[in-house]
Amino acid sequence: MNDHKPTVVLLFGGRSGEHEVSLNSASSIYKAIDRSRYNVETIGINKQGQWFWGVIPDQILKTGFPTTTEGLQVTLVIDPTQPHFLAINGQSLPNDGKFDLVFPVLHGTYGEDGTLQGLLEMANVPYVGSGVLGSSLGMDKDRMKAVFIERNLPSARYVTLLRSEFLREPETYLNKIEAQLGYPCFVKPANLGSSVGISKAHDRTELQESLKTAAIFDRKIVIEESINGHEIEVSVLGNDSPIASIPGEVLPAQEFYTYEAKYSNIGSSLLIPAALEDDIVKKLQLMAIQAFQAVEASGLSRVDFFVNDENEIFLNEINTLPGFTEISMYPKLWEATGIPYTELIDRLIILGMERFQDKQNCKISQND
């Protein structure tokens, strides 16, 4: 990066069920990023999708977003030759709104699913994390699992159905799920993370209610068989040559790792490193990298597994933009592996720059 001190735009909030998680992640990153190496600007996106320049995550957590008359709304100018942010009211921005990289901390829809990444690609903007394909595959649990199966990565059995199908023929699909998976089973919106909308069904009544709950959040629903085993997570870092952290185990206070357990820290705990045999650790690390490469992720991901008492490994899912709060597994695993939080942020920024530069080496046409 030479002598130039890059400007990093921390982008957070968003139109997602994980809006508050994003604010907490951004708060931690904002406090920890190395100001001696980077200039930091912030843009917060409210739940209506409006972008505000200069808002601070902790302040938003306390008092909420400003109104459109109080705050400085901005938009990204889609000019691949000179991408920059522009104030909607015409007010000047630092360095005329120019920057070097966007660090998205937008969990869930409109941030982690490839939509934001497509916008940034159109504008020719360097950014942290996976691209359009990796983000969209990592977000959609149904398509993610299909890719894992294609790569012969062992996963739990599952059934996918559309909300419209369930509403039209509820008995048909209840029967299908019971026949193929049995009880208990997990019911999940296909395109949400952080355990939002997820339920564990133990009988037909709970299954029907769980499907209704998941249908509130997504048009596509994934139902998985329940695996009795330890919940193990591995962090992955890199682009073309990713590395894997030591594994950690989630010890949920509730029956499964709910949204509240993840972000309120109510009784749940993380065991780092997980108490596993060395050969199982190596298998998990290899499989985590294989999952990362299967969806063509880049930058960062957290890969989740189940390991049963017979040491069988089941790949659960990949999260291409995992939580970055103080109690989140992704940074804690890297810290235990030897990469402190601030250094981890630095590495992710460098990986984002490297991925962008690599893409600039591609020709658009033969005549370029």
Image (cartoon, helix red, strand yellow):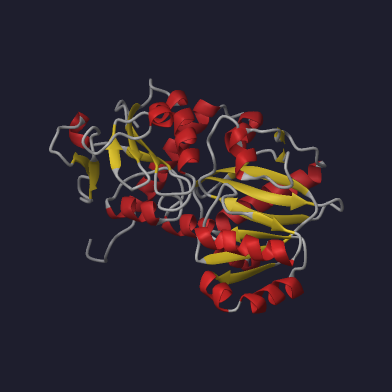
In the shown orientation, is residue 279 left or right of residue 173?
A: right
- Coordinates of residue 150 in the picture (x, y in percent): 62, 69
Q: Quadrant location of residue 179?
A: bottom right
Residue 335 in sight here? yes
Between 23 and 97, the one lying in front of the other is 23
Residue 138, compared with residue 67, is above or below; it is below
- Coordinates of residue 120 in the picture (x, y in percent): 32, 50
Outermost residue on the left side: it is: 90
In the shown orientation, is residue 73 left or right of residue 9?
A: left
In the shown orientation, is residue 324 left or right of residue 97?
A: right
Outermost residue on the right side: it is: 310
- Coordinates of residue 260 in the picture (x, y in percent): 61, 40
Between 264 and 325, the one lying in front of the other is 264
Quarter occupied by the C terminus:
bottom left
Residue at 20% x, 50% y is: 79
Outermost residue on the top side: it is: 36
Between 157 and 78, the one lying in front of the other is 157
Residue 154 in sight here? no
Residue at 14% x, 39% y is: 89
Residue at 20% x, 31% y is: 95
Q: Quadrant location of residue 226?
A: bottom right
